[in-house]
Amino acid sequence: MELSDTWMREAAKDGVTTWRAPGRTMRVGPGGSWRCANGADIIASLDAELPPNPTGKVGEGGRDGVGHRAAWLYRQDGDVKFTLYGFNFIDGTYLETIFISADTVDPSWAFDAWRSVSRSGD
C-alpha cells in the first residue's frame, strides 16, 4: 500500500494494525473467508454490516494480484470529515482498510491508498 505523508504504525490489536498521520487514521485487518459465497452475496453481506446511508459506493476490477475492490464512503460533519471502508479481495479472502480523515474533506488520498493495495508474493 502506498501512503502519502508521514505515518506512524501502532501495535496491532486483535489482528488489526493502525497507522496515524496528522488528522488521519488508517486501520487494516484481514477479512473473513468467502470461498463458498458468490460476489453479490459477499457485497450484500458487507453492505449489511456497514453503517447505513453511505454517501457513495464504488466497485472496481483489481490488479497486481487483487481480484476486485469495493468501497463505501461516508461523509460526516464535525471532527471527522469522512470515513472510507475499503475491501480488496484476494484468493478467497479479503483485506479490510478503514480510512478516517479529520483534516480534509477531500477523500482522494484515501482512495489512492485503497487502490494501491497489491499482493506481494505468496
Image (cartoon, helix red, strand yellow):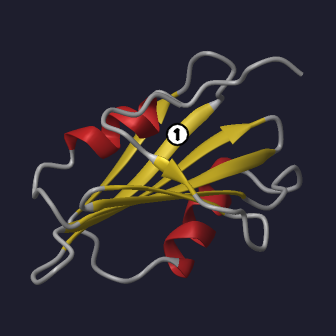
Q: Where is residue 57 in the image (x, y as percent from the top left)?
A: 33, 55
Residue occupying image coordinates x 26% and y 40%: 109
Picture residue at 78% right of the left edge, 73% below the top: 14
Q: Is residue 117 above or below residue 73?
A: above
Residue 95 in the figure: left or right of residue 59? right
Left or right? Give the position of 53 relative to 96: left
Q: Residue at x 24, y 61 (%)?
A: 23
* Mark 1 residue type: Arg
In the image, 87: left or right of 93? Answer: left
Q: Position of residue 21 (x, y in %)?
A: 35, 53
Residue 110 picture location, percent across and down: 32, 45
Which is nearer the eye, 61 or 90? 90
**The C terminus: image quadrant:** top right
Q: In this view, does 82 lie above or below 36?
A: below
> Where does label 1 land, which residue?
69
Mark 1 surroundings within 10 Å by alpha-carbon count, few (fewer than 14), some (14 through 19), many (20 or more)? many
Instruction: Using the image, determine if residue 101 lies above or below residue 52.
Output: above
Give the percent coordinates (x, y) of residue 76: 16, 77
Quadrant of the image occupied by residue 54: bottom left
In the rendered structure, the answer to whether residue 106 lies left or right of residue 2 reads left
Mark 1 residue element = strand
